[in-house]
Image: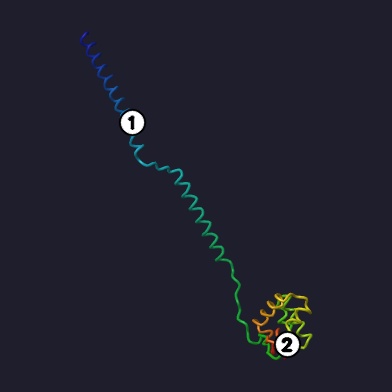
Amino acid sequence: MQIENSLTQMALDEAIIIALSSTMNMVLVQSLVQQMDQMMPHNDTGENTTLLWIIIILLLVIIAYLWFMGVRKKPQILPIQESEINVIEPETIETDKIEVALRLLNDNEKQIVQALIEHRGTMLQKDISNELEMTRVQTHRAIQSLIERDIVTSEDHFNTKKITLADWLIQ
C-alpha cells in the first residue's frame, strides 16, 4: 500500500510539475506575444473603417449630385429665323454725338465741353479756368484727358492755349 501511495504521490507530484510548467509556458508565451505586439505597428481598424465609410458616402453624394444635374432638362436653343430678325439700318439710328460724349466724361470735362459749346467751339484755356472757377491744374488735366480722347484740340496762342472742339463733334 505504501508503494501505491508513493506511486500516487509521485504521479501527483508529476502532475503538479507538468501543470506548473504548462502555466509557466503560457505566461512565457503571453509575454512573448505582448513583446511582439509592441514591436509590430498598430492597425486600428476602427478608425480606418470609419474613414472608409466617410469616403464612400461622399463619393455617393457627389455621384448623385452630378447625375441629377445631368438629368435635369436643359432648355433648347432654337435658331432664329430670318423673318424674326429686326435689321436696323445705320441711317435710322439717330444719336446726338455730343450727348454720347458727355455721358463718358467726368464732371470737370463735362463743364469744359459745355462751355466750349456755349462759346461756339473755341475758348482760351485761361478763360475756361476763370469762367468755370477751376484751378489751372484742374483745367490742364481735364483738357489733357479730352485731347487724349480726341474730343478737343489744343494749339498755342501767345502765353496760353486755344482749345477747340473736335470737328466730328461740331458736324
Q: Amino acid at mark 1?
A: Ser
Frontmost residue, 138 versus 85: 138
Query: In this figure, which residue is indicated by the disc labeled 1?
Result: 31
For label 2, the SS is: loop
Label 1: few (<14), some or many (≥20) within 10 Å? few
Q: Which mark is residue 94?
A: 2
- The span from disc 2 to disc 1 (Cα, nearest Å) is 101 Å
Residue 64, horizontal then vertical, whole percent: 53, 59
Is residue 83 found left or right of 25 in the rendered image?
A: right
Q: How is the image coloured?
A: rainbow
Frontmost residue, 11 versus 145: 145
Q: Which mark is residue 125?
A: none
Name the residue at the left extreme: 3
Residue 71, horizontal then vertical, whole percent: 56, 66
**Would you place residue 45 above or below residue 93 in this image?**
above
Frontmost residue, 82 versus 13: 82
**Would you place residue 69 above or below residue 148 in this image?**
above
